[in-house]
Image (cartoon, rainbow, N blue to C red):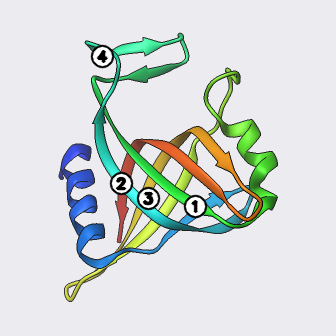
Amino acid sequence: MLSEEKLLQELIKLHENSSLGFLLHADEKIHHLNSVKISKSPTPVTRPTLRGGIYFSDTYEYKITGIISDQTIIPFLSKAMLGPNTEFGDIIITTKSNTKENSEQIVLHTNLTNSMQSSSSIKLNLIIIGIEIKN
């Protein structure tokens, strides 16, 4: 079994090479997540810590950004975002890896750190907190 770090690194390479399609699951609805970028970046902490007594932060984190055009998701995002909420929900994002050998569903567990809304779309910034592969 591969570690989550290794799986995330492989996902980044796979997405760079074949531009995967991503779906965001919220309130029993599925939304297409467009212009997806996945990256690894440092955090402002010098050692692993519990931030605000609410969530764990390591010295680096994997992030995913994407754009949704469906404005009906706004009430869900307000409840799910980190920050003023002490009870926030995981946001599930899925994609499929189709190779000659097999097809696997990749499930990302994320937390929303912020969103930027325009008249036609919403840009989401999320931290990836877990990954799993389903055959």
Q: Please state the horizontal and vertical placement of residue 106, each as a whole percent of the image.
A: 39, 64
The residue under label 2 is 38
Q: Please state the horizontal and vertical placement of residue 134, each as a whole percent of the image.
A: 38, 65
Answer with left or right where residue 45 lies relative to residue 3.
right
> Of the residues shown, which amino acid type is indicated by label 3?
Val
Which residue lies at the image location 28% right of the left edge and 61% below the top edge?
Answer: 11
Question: What is the distance, in whole Å, between disc 2 and disc 1 at their CAs?
Answer: 13 Å
Most foreground residue, 57 or 45: 45
The residue under label 4 is 48
At numbered mark 3, what does the secondary structure look like: helix, strand or loop? strand
Question: What is the distance, in whole Å, between disc 3 and disc 2 at their CAs?
Answer: 14 Å
Q: Please report whichever mark, 2 or 4, sits nearer to the chain's N-terminal start.
A: 2
Which residue lies at the image location 48% right of the left edge and 66% below the top edge?
Answer: 35
At numbered mark 1, what does the secondary structure look like: helix, strand or loop? strand
Q: Which disc is residue 107 wearing? A: 3
> Of the residues shown, which amino acid type is indicated by label 1?
Ile
